[in-house]
Image: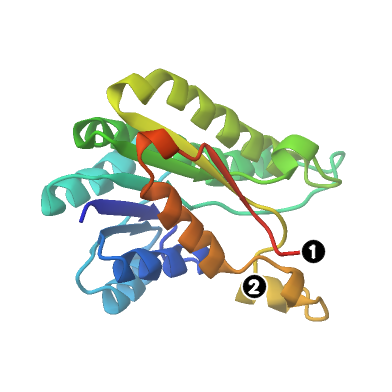
Amino acid sequence: MPTVVITGAAGAIGSVTARTFREAGWDLGLIDYGDENQDLLEREFPDAVVAAADLTRKADAREAMDAVASATGGIGAVLGVAGGFAMQEAEKATEDDYRHMMDINFRTLFQTARAAIPYLKESRPGLLLGVSAPAAEEGGAEAGLYAASKAAVSAYLKSLHAELEGDGVRTSRLVPMGVVDTEANRAAMPHADVETWVAPRELAEGMLHVATRSRRGHIAELRVSTAG
């Protein structure tokens, strides 16, 4: 089976995605930030190539991607799951708020893509997937910076697809259409009806489905929601 690289692999969505792809027989390259996350991933996924990296940094992204490709012989898919959410009133938003949202949601994907594209071209076909959000199109009160960063993700992935499709590299966008059912969200919203939330396993299985399509069945955007 080919190798999949998952960024944000220690997070709520990334860890479930790693398990899902492992169960499907893929080799794993798992990237997250910091020694603690690296240790956690190495314990749960002893057969994976695990790298700690600050994906806002070009050198870190390239070193991590090179390590995975060297150990596995190539990379067939890259899932840019790393990201985050924060709210601020527009009038009170700071330069630091701006940098944080753009760094965690867009810059991580930008540096990941630049490091991965040479390997994805070699694999032919190769897939680069990123995570967007409904706010990228609709906006949201007190979520302007988050929405802008996710809009950047969508526009960037569409542009890369147009640029790289002839080289055998396609891109996809995963859009969770609502709150994702994570421990952090349950703690933040203890009285919410979690049955209306999107399950991480459904997102992971959706990404696996996207990664296994041929060019004749490519999925440019996958929106995942709960039934009404």
Figure check: 9 above or below 196: above
Q: Which mark is residue 184?
A: 2
Residue displayed at 31% across by 78% down: 44
Q: Which quadrant of the figure has residue 185?
A: bottom right
Q: Of helix, strand and loop, which one carries label 1?
A: loop
The x, y position of residue 30, in whole percent, is: 32, 59
Residue picked out by circle 1? 228
Q: CA distance from mark 2 to mark 1?
A: 24 Å
- Residue 27, visible in the rendered structure: yes
Please state if 127 lies on the left or on the right of 2 as rendered.
right
- Whether residue 57 is visible to the viewer of this picture, yes or no, is no
Q: Nearer the viewer, residue 102 or 164?
A: 164
Q: For residue 10, which quarter of the picture?
A: bottom left
Q: Earlier in the sequence, mark 2 or mark 1?
A: 2
Query: SS of the residue at dot 2?
Result: helix
Asked if labels 1 and 2 touch by Cβ distance under 8 angstroms, the answer is no
Residue toward you, 176 or 107:
176
Q: Residues within 10 Å of mark 1 (few under 14, many from 20)?
A: few
Q: Could you tell whether 19 is left or right of 132 in the image?
A: left
Amino acid beneath label 2: Ala
Q: Residue at point 49% right, 39% down? A: 172
